Each structure stands twice: as structure tokens, then as C-alpha cells.
Amino acid sequence: MPSPLVPLPPRQVGIADAAQFTGTAPETIREYQRIGLLAEPAQGSDGGGRYGYEDMIRLLWIRKMADAAMAVDDIREVFADPAPAGDDDGGDAAAVVVKRMRTVEGRMGLLSDVVTGRLEELPAGWLRQAELDSLLVMERIFGPLGAAVNAGRYTVMAAHPGLREESDRVEAAEEALDDTVAVEDPRVVQAAADRHAFEGKLDAAIINSGQAQSDDELFDSWDALNPAGTARGEDAGAGEACVSLIDAVKMMPYDYSPARLRCLELTAELAANEPNAAPAAAAK
């Protein structure tokens, strides 16, 4: 198999990588586990804890809420299952915040202002929790500016329902590439081709909508307001070590099968071999 053009994510990571990626001390992670805020991790062959995608997403949201000065008990209530969303809060301010944090719109406000500003353009209820989780990871890896540009994809898809439907079909095909699917299965190649085709349509829609120009303006305004080197890691805490982009990607686990990883490689190869041709007409 050829060397990947993009770094491939692990399925699970140890506590050291989990701590470095989320900006949370290992001792704090263990304390979250002790008090039930975070589930005990799976055990690796070395006896150490292994953290997966859902664990990392929860840790990232916990950190955001802690940074927003939410009490531990209130954070625990946010993640309560089932969430008693219909309960009367009795006018209690903390209870109101907890309710708000159980919604996509509420957690949206925990992201950087530049990202939230883009998301506020979306119709109410359009953005899904999984998509907000993805932006949370984007913000951690690429910084607020990178996450804001990615958020622009959603504003364009919201204006083109056909793109949203195609995105759902492509993602469903990719998710079907589980551990029962061989790397050589024709579905792997087809899923990569479908992803590449979809990204081309989305890029065309972004350019024709004026979003690309808006992105350029966003970069210019960011450069004017922020010192060099702050595009990534704006929310890093004091004393956190700087992590390279490649290392950051390798610290964020995704439970991808070998077939799914091969699909990622093929998609990257298709993009790398794409000629710099003018984009097609915008999606309808």
C-alpha cells in the first residue's frame, strides 16, 4: 500500500495523547473518571486506558464548559441521559444554562466567536450535533480560523438542499465500510470516487455563492487582528506545549476500519491528481 498523502488517525489513543490533544492534564482526566463525569476507558494490551472518538469529544466539551466557569455538577447534568429537557428550571440560572448546553444552539456558543458567527447564518435546527462535534475537533486541530472556513461549508449546503442529501448518502456509504469490508472491496473505490465527486460539487457551490471570497476576507481580517502564528490553538491553556498539525491529527482517534482508512487514502490521491480546472456549475 502506498504511503498516505494525509496522516491517518488511530482508532484509540492513550491518556498522554488524550491529555495533550484536549489540553487537559492526565490527573484531571482521571479525576473526571473518578467522579463519573467521564466513563472509564477501554483497557489496552499494556493495561493502560485507551480513549476513542466519543471519549475525546466529551473531554473537549467538558473543557469548553469548564473554561466557561460551569460547575462540575452542572456539566454532569448536561450529559445526563436521558436529558430531562422538559423539566421546569424554576428560574434557576444554572439550570437554564444546563438546558441550553443540551442543545446544538447552546453548545455552538462555546466555540470561538469567529466560528459561531458563521454558524449563526444557518436556519434554526439545521446543524446536527455530530457536525458541531466535528467543528469542535476542527477548532482544536486547525484553530478558530480553520474551523470557521469549514463552517462555511454548512452555510452553502443549507442553501443547496441537494448537496445536503448527497452528503448524507456519501457519509452513509463511508460508514458502511466497517471491519467486515475488505480493503480490496470495490465499494472502497466507489466510496472514494463519490466523496471526491461530492467535494468537487461543494467547492463549485462555495465559489459560485461568494463564500470563497468571504473566506479570503476572513483571512485578511484575521491577519489584521491577530499576531502571526495564532491561527491554530487559540484556546490552548497556559503552559500547553505546541503540537504540530500532523501530531494533532494523529492524537485524535476515529474508529475507522482498514477499508475506511483506505477510502481516505484514495480520496486524497484523487484530490492530489485533480487538474487545476475551473469549477463546474453550482449545484442546484
Image: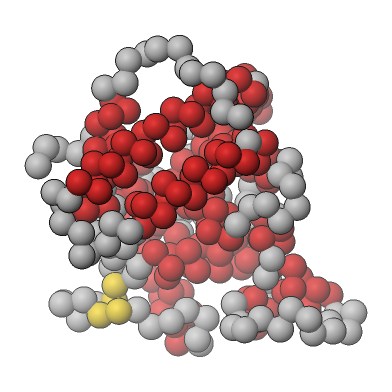
Question: Residue at image x 17%, y 50%?
Answer: 185
Above or below: residue 268 compared with residue 39: above
Q: Can residue 26 be seen in this view?
A: yes
Above or below: residue 57 compared with residue 203: below
Residue 132, percent from left and from top: 57, 54
Instruction: Give the side of residue 95 with respect to residue 276, left or right.
Output: right
Q: In which quarter of the image is the C terminus?
A: top right
Residue 276, percent from left and from top: 37, 13
The foreground one among 21 and 101 is: 101
The foreground one among 106 and 238 is: 106
Question: Residue at image x 14%, y 38%?
Answer: 3
The foreground one among 275 and 88 is: 275
Residue 206, percent from left and from top: 57, 27
Question: Residue at image x 46%, y 41%?
Answer: 142
Q: Can residue 136 be seen in this view?
A: no
Question: Residue at image x 25%, y 48%?
Answer: 187
Residue 87, percent from left and from top: 79, 84
Residue projecting furthest to the right: 91
The foreground one among 60 and 4 is: 4
Total numbered circles: 0
Instruction: Give the side of residue 93 with respect to residue 78, left or right.
Output: right
Q: In which quarter of the image is the N terminus?
A: top left
Residue projecting furthest to the left: 1
Query: Dividing the picture into quarters, in which one does residue 12 lie?
Result: bottom left
